[in-house]
Amino acid sequence: MAIRTIRTEGDEILRKKCKEVTELTPRIQTLIEDMIETMYRANGVGLAAPQVGILRRVVVIDVTDGKEPIVLINPVILETSGEQTGGEGCLSIPGKTATVTRPNYVRVLAYDEKMQQREVEGTELLARAICHECDHLEGKLYVDIAESPIMDTDVYYAEQEEE
Ligand code: NI
């Protein structure tokens, strides 16, 4: 496994639409392993392939502190419900955060790391992460739909505490 370089905002690759994975090749398997390692190293809860410069529909997520990484290949959101409004960040926009409203529940159809099709359900942070990472596959970033100014993370948390 290897740590890959995370592309940051301004890199055109983050704005491109990703292609479906049709076959689980050794190259895709290595990509998945590297993405998980890169996400953990960066203390992120999710990472999408374009963030490491690969225009494929592959996402990794872990909202459990390293216990349960989820791999979503060719994810399709089947159902959403409810709403949550809160702070969101992105490893491609380091040190920044803004307020984003997302569904509070998401059900997604995807292939896992063995190319087995499965459905994954998530609420709260997991639902937010699924939506955020699926957006990356379309070339979308959270700043496109942010409802507050994009702030430095330390400023944001200071303002939250004042409320
Ligand atoms: Ni992101």
Image (cartoon, rainbow, N blue to C red):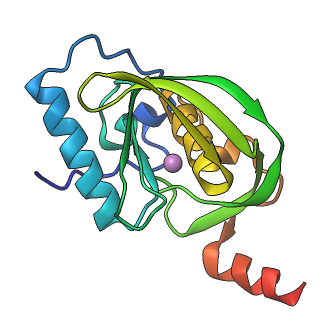
Residue at image position (76%, 41%) is 103
Residue 83, image x, y percentages: 83, 46
Residue at image position (33%, 51%) is 6
Q: Is residue 39 above or below residue 143?
A: below
In this view, which residue lies farthest toward the top? 22
In this view, which residue lies farthest toward the right? 163
Residue 57, image x, y percentages: 39, 25
Q: Is residue 104 above or below residue 136?
A: below
Q: Quadrant of residue 86?
A: bottom right
Q: Quadrant of the C terminus?
A: bottom right
Q: Quadrant of residue 116?
A: top left
Image-based side of 33 in relation to 110, left or right: left
Say if residue 138 shows up in the picture: no
Q: Is residue 55 above or below residue 38?
A: above
Q: Is residue 160 above or below residue 92?
A: below
Image-based side of 157 in relation to 89, left or right: right
Residue at image position (36%, 51%) is 69
Image-based side of 40 in relation to 87, left or right: left
Residue 143, image x, y percentages: 67, 48
Image-based side of 125 in relation to 110, left or right: right
Say if residue 15 shows up in the picture: yes
Tally of numbered discs: 0
- Between 16 and 75, the residue placed more toward the observer is 75
- Between 9 and 107, the residue placed more toward the observer is 107
Residue 160, image x, y percentages: 80, 80
Residue at image position (83%, 52%) is 147
